[in-house]
Amino acid sequence: MLDNRGCTRTECVPRHAERELTEDDWGYLIYCMPVPVPDSSHRPASLRDYAYESLRTAIVDGTLAPGEKLRDAELESWLGVSRTPIREAIARLETAGLVRTERARQTIVAPLDERAALNAQAIAASLHELAAREAVAQLTAADLAQMTAANERFRLALAANDVAAAIAADDDFHAVAVRASANELLPALLEQVTPTLRRLERARFSSLAGRASVADHERIIRLCADGLAVEAGTAVRENWLTLGRMLATAHLADPAD
């Protein structure tokens, strides 16, 4: 019989069946149509997650602009997946406030909403505070080294006014405590609010000079190393509440905005 790829080539017959194909095999050949075998090194673990992550990234980084219509056919062509995982991804994005379904089932990228972002920030700050408090007793020397390395990447990105790299490094910094907390609910909860914050930061600021400073991160690392869970949690919370101050400063600089 043929191998599980359904290939019609003679070399695809199992090695132990050392014979050429005969007329008796044609029934199998007709039934087992050739199916391309995807490269497993590039195949996503879940098409639903792949579609969601791809669309989320495109919305957060501005590739898909506010108000842009999301058409299933175009998304299928771009992502190379069927409509089902795309619609499931859009449902998740709508829950996170990144897309909006209007009349006639038309789906668009949601407009930027500062109020929604600030509400999301308050939730994110509380969640990260909880993560830090729960993580401090579990953090290892390797964890602290990862935080220090992420903070160095953050410093270099700020110096270069590289908003994307600064946000990525900041995410890496805080992800250490989230992982170490071993609280299985935190990642999913943070996924619902963090993209909204990051989207506004990318759209509103050409520089993150007013964002949490390198010194703030260094203080968090020291508090974690000293085992001061409550103090570390408070510092992390303050660290995440800087977006409001950045927006206030931006509005003062441009009263007409």
Image (tube, rainbow, N blue to C red):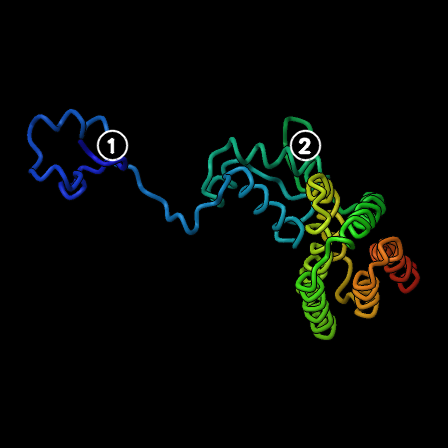
Is residue 13 something one can see in this rendering? Answer: yes
- Callout 1, which amino acid? Met
Which one is earlier in the sequence, the residue at label 1 or at label 2?
A: 1
The image quadrant where one finds the N terminus is top left
Q: Position of residue 23 (x, y in %)?
A: 7, 28
Asked whether, in this view, residue 142 is left or right of residue 257, the answer is left
Q: Nearer the viewer, mark 1 or mark 2?
A: 1
Which residue occupies 69% across, 64% down?
141
Residue 101, numbered circle: 2
Q: Position of residue 152 (x, y in %)?
A: 70, 71
Asked whether, in this view, residue 209 is left or right of residue 14, the answer is right
Could you say which is closer to the camera, residue 242 or residue 200? 242
Residue 33, numbered circle: 1
Q: Is disc 2 surrounded by few (<14), some (14 to 19) or many (20+) residues within 10 Å?
A: some
Task: Assign a secondary structure to mark 2.
Answer: strand
Task: Assign a secondary structure to mark 1.
Answer: loop
Could you say which is closer to the camera, residue 161 or residue 63? 161
Could you say which is closer to the camera, residue 172 or residue 108? 172
